[in-house]
């Protein structure tokens, strides 16, 4: 359930929105109410709502000023409630990334649409965050190798090569032959330095690059599979889902 805070100085409107709408049916729960901009900021900081419905004209701080100040202490999506006379003023708040502007009295169907839009945005952001957590941070990997010795030089060479040639056929055995060491020795040294196996690192790096290509919208899924070095489309789907919990096609959607 997504957490909703209602900030409206007119008690009858605030209570009407809170208690006559089917919030559970919208996938939400009301976590609190506030009657002015100052109280709204305090409630946002305390309750950490996902969504804030805010009237424009309120005591102490108006809705726009409240949102501006509250954004400094919390992250949330916002919906502005406005009368016709205030509509142009509300539009000036575009830079606050307000999700929707609703005219008062609030139409239930319009509110449902606005909430559905925000939930879609939140779900997408949650998925991106999960993917980011599961995707390897290549820049951070570079900082692991602090000892200037031969073993770590081997591993650093592998990392540098992967970044440039990840789309090609790569294996730990190939590196071992070129470096004149055994594959088992090199595998062990790589895991000691990187905290993960070579294959796991390679797959994660390829998936990371695949995400960038998919986000660009320029390529079809099978093209991204080829461009990131996966042996076939089915294998690409399997590996991508293993690290992101979604298939490439689901990710695009």
Image: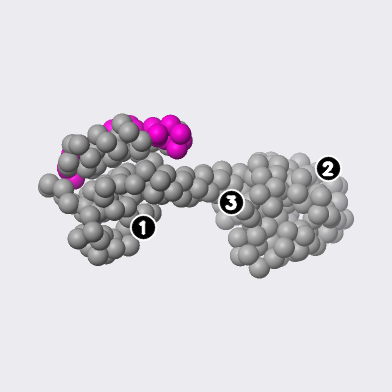
Residue 202 location in percent, x, y? 73, 51
How many C-alpha atoms fall within 10 Å of the one at disc 2: few (<14), some, or many (≥20)?
few
| Residue 26 is a magenta residue | yes
Look at discs 2 and 3 and give the one toward the viewer.
3
Observer able to see residue 40 = no
The earlier-in-sequence mark between 2 and 1 is 1
Q: Which residue is mark 3?
A: 137
Look at discs 1 and 3 and give the one toward the viewer.
1
Q: Which residue is mark 2?
A: 184
Q: Quadrant of residue 153 in the image?
A: bottom right
Q: Which residues are magenta?
A: 22-38
Kindly give the residue lying farthest to the left in the view shown.
60
| Residue 121 is a magenta residue | no
Residue 98 location in percent, x, y? 34, 55
Q: CA distance from mark 2 to mark 1?
A: 53 Å
Q: Quadrant of residue 165 in the image?
A: bottom right
Q: CA distance from mark 2 to mark 3?
A: 25 Å
Q: Secondary structure at mark 3?
A: loop
Q: Which residue is mark 1?
A: 97
Q: Is residue 168 left or right of residue 118?
A: right
Q: Are marks 2 and 1 in contact (CB under 8 Å)?
A: no
Instruction: Between residue 242 and residue 206, name the one nearer to us.
Output: 242
At horizontal 39% and vertical 41% (from top left) the residue drawn is: 50
At horizontal 63% and vertical 65% (from top left) the residue drawn is: 217
Q: CA distance from mark 1 to mark 3?
A: 29 Å
Observer able to see residue 91 = yes
Q: Secondary structure at mark 2?
A: helix
Quadrant of the drawing holding the N terminus: top left
Q: Is 153 situated above or below 187?
A: below
């Amino acid at each position: 359930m997504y957490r909703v805070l209602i900030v409206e100085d007119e008690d009858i409107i605030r209570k009407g929105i809170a208690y006559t709408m089917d919030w559970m049916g919208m996938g939400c729960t009301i976590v609190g109410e506030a009657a002015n901009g100052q109280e709204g900021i305090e409630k946002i900081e305390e309750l950490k709502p996902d969504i804030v419905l805010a009237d424009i004209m309120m005591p102490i701080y108006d809705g726009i000023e409240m949102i501006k100040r509250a954004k400094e202490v919390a992250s949330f999506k916002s919906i502005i409630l406005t009368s016709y006379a205030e509509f142009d003023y509300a539009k000036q708040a575009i830079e606050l990334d307000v999700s929707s502007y609703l005219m008062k009295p609030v139409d239930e169907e319009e509110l449902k649409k606005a909430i559905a839009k925000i939930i879609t945005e939140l779900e997408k952001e949650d998925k991106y965050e999960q993917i980011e957590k599961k995707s390897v941070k290549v820049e951070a990997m570079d900082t692991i190798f602090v000892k200037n010795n031969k073993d770590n030089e081997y591993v650093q060479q592998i990392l540098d090569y992967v970044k440039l040639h990840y789309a090609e056929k790569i294996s730990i055995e190939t590196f071992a032959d070129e470096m004149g060491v055994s594959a088992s020795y090199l595998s062990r040294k790589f895991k000691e330095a990187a905290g993960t196996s070579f294959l796991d690192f390679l797959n994660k790096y390829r998936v990371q690059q695949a995400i960038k290509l998919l986000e660009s919208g320029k390529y079809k899924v099978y093209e991204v599979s080829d461009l990131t070095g996966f042996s076939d489309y089915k294998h690409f789907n399997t590996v991508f889902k293993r690290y992101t919990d979604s298939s490439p096609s689901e990710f695009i959607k």
